[in-house]
Amino acid sequence: MGLLTEEEIIGEIPVLARLSIGSEKLRLFATTSRMIVAHVGKRGVGALATTSFFGRLSGAMEDLFKSGREFKGNKELGNLEPEGILAANKDNFFITYSEVVSVEVAETSGLTRVTVLTREDKFKFSTVWSADKVVRLLRKPLGGKVVHSVGR
């Protein structure tokens, strides 16, 4: 039998995914073999409306008022191994790098949009991270599958 290589987390990106009403706060964990999408909490329609006027300030204000359980759970995610992250919430899931067709990263209006296209699905996220920072992290495991679009 060959040696087993242990999966390691190489980085994480805090992101939002839009829902029909509100948004979902998530964390994308890049590991040595896959991308893990971990749920942190939902945000209401008020958070989206405020974001357009006050940008990052609304997120900071909402964080002040969010539940202690969410804060504690979010903090604990960073201390878990990949399997523990997946087990932390029934809605957490992973995407193996072999499933990824492309990842488009584009900076627009102070936010960075990250679109992950797999053979089966398309996932759209946004983050306050710079596009360059997202590209640097995701190119480690995905190489040329990561495309940095400018001005879209």
Image: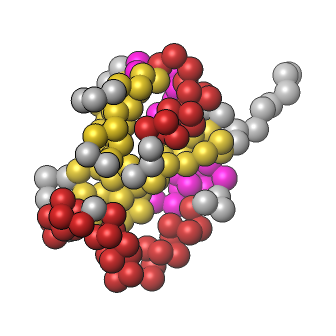
Instruction: Give percent across and percent down for residue 143.
Output: 56, 20
Query: How many numbered dots are placed on residues in this image?
Result: 0
Residue at image point 84% right, 22% down: 2
Q: Can you give x and y, in whole percent of width and height, for residue 20 in the image?
A: 14, 53
Foreground residue among 31 and 49: 49
**Observer able to see residue 116:** no
Tell me which residue sits at (62%, 29%) in the image.
140
Q: Is residue 2 above or below residue 125?
A: above
Tell me: residue 65, above or below residue 11: below
Asked whether 74 falls inside the magenta stretch, the response is no
Image height check: is 54 above or below 111?
A: below
Report x, y in % for residue 118: 37, 24
- On the image, the x and y values in percent for residue 149 come to 35, 25
Type of colouring: secondary structure
The residue lying toward the viewer, choosing from 135 and 73, is 135
**Image quadrant for the N terminus?**
top right
Residue under the point 28% across and 29% down = 151
133 relative to 86, above or below: above
Taking the image as drawn, is residue 119 in sight? yes
Classify the position of the C terminus by image quarter: top left
Residue 100 part of the magenta-drawn span: yes
Q: Residue at x 52, y 76 (%)?
A: 72
Give the image quarter of residue 57.
bottom left
Magenta-drawn segment: 81-102
